[in-house]
Image (cartoon, rainbow, N blue to C red):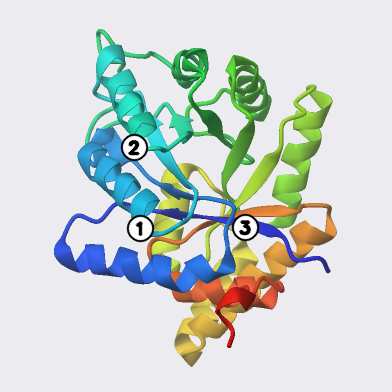
Amino acid sequence: MTAPSISFEFFPPQSLEASFRLWDTVQVLAPLQPRFVSVTYGAGGTTRDLTREAVATLHKSSGLPVAAHLTCVNASREETLGIARDFADAGVSDIVALRGDPPKGSSGFTAHPDGFATSVDLIEALNETGDFTIRVGAYPDKHPEAADSQADVQYLKRKIAAGASEALTQFFFEAETFFRFRDACEKAGIDAPITPGILPIENWKGAARFAKACGTPIPTWLADAFDKAERDGREDLLATAICAELCSDLIDGGVDTLHFYTLNRPELTRDVCHALGVTPKLDLKNVA
């Protein structure tokens, strides 16, 4: 099995303790030489400034290519493009462009009166600047707001046509879910790379809540396995085995890039990468 190319998602810290955790996460995962790392935007744009600060800091201090998430939520076009210019001025040329989740407690997404109404509008505007490599989200399972799975495929096609060069999928629990989606995208004429998003399950109850919110179906076998593992105190072993097997199945099916949602907890992601043959690279220049 050929080791895949990898990338990692982090979220911006909201406290001093969380800042240390993010830096520790970067220190653990940076030796695996990801092709990029991304920093998220909180629901409703709540971490806009924190994201900007984290992106700039990581870009300066980590030596890693950094992609900044950017959304349409709670900001005018001018404000959103101003943030993009700030990223460009800081030397960050990769953006993950998303519509974004509505603020917690709201009934759904409502565009800012002077803002971007859709992610396609945002992608077109970013593409016109010529400053960025643009990645976008994709949904192997039906997005909660989509009419059906084919609507998700057609909307991804619009995002690629607007200027995106790669799609990063929402997480899923079975390889066949991704393969069905990949086949549907190919049939629709989408030829941009589609990278599977992988969620190592650090905490089963939290992952199950997250899946429900995202509309990601939970296989019965998976829930049963974690229920039993919790009783036996073997959750960590099960989580590593299941995630490594999912990634291995994807690689066997022709996948050569993986994007890990780390939740700023690096150990399980690192262990899975090691199991896939992704190991720290030795810098021969520093060897005596």
Q: Which mark is residue 149?
A: none
Q: Secondary structure at mark 3?
A: strand
Q: Which mark is residue 61?
A: 1
3 or 1: tag closer to the N-terminus: 3
Name the image quarter holding residue 140.
Answer: top right
Marks 3/1 in contact by CB < 8 Å: the verdict is no
* Residue 24 seen in render: yes
Tell us which disc is closer to us: 3 or 2: 2
Left or right: 233 in relation to 142: left
CA distance for labels 3 and 1: 20 Å
Q: Amino acid at mark 3?
A: Ile
Marks 3/2 in contact by CB < 8 Å: the verdict is no
Left or right: 280 in relation to 122: right
Badge 1 local density, few (<14 within 10 Å), some, or many (20+)?
few
- In this view, the residue in front, 64 or 108, is 64
1 or 2: tag closer to the N-terminus: 1
| Residue that appears at 50% across and 28% down | 132
Q: Which residue is mark 3?
A: 6
Q: Is residue 19 above or below residue 60?
A: below
3 or 2: tag closer to the N-terminus: 3
Name the image quarter holding residue 74.
Answer: top left
Residue furthest to the bottom in view is: 232
Q: Amino acid at mark 1?
A: Ser
CA distance for labels 1 and 2: 12 Å
CA distance for labels 3 and 2: 24 Å
Quadrant including the C terminus: bottom right
Q: Which residue is mark 2?
A: 90
Q: Secondary structure at mark 2?
A: loop
Quadrant including the N terminus: bottom right
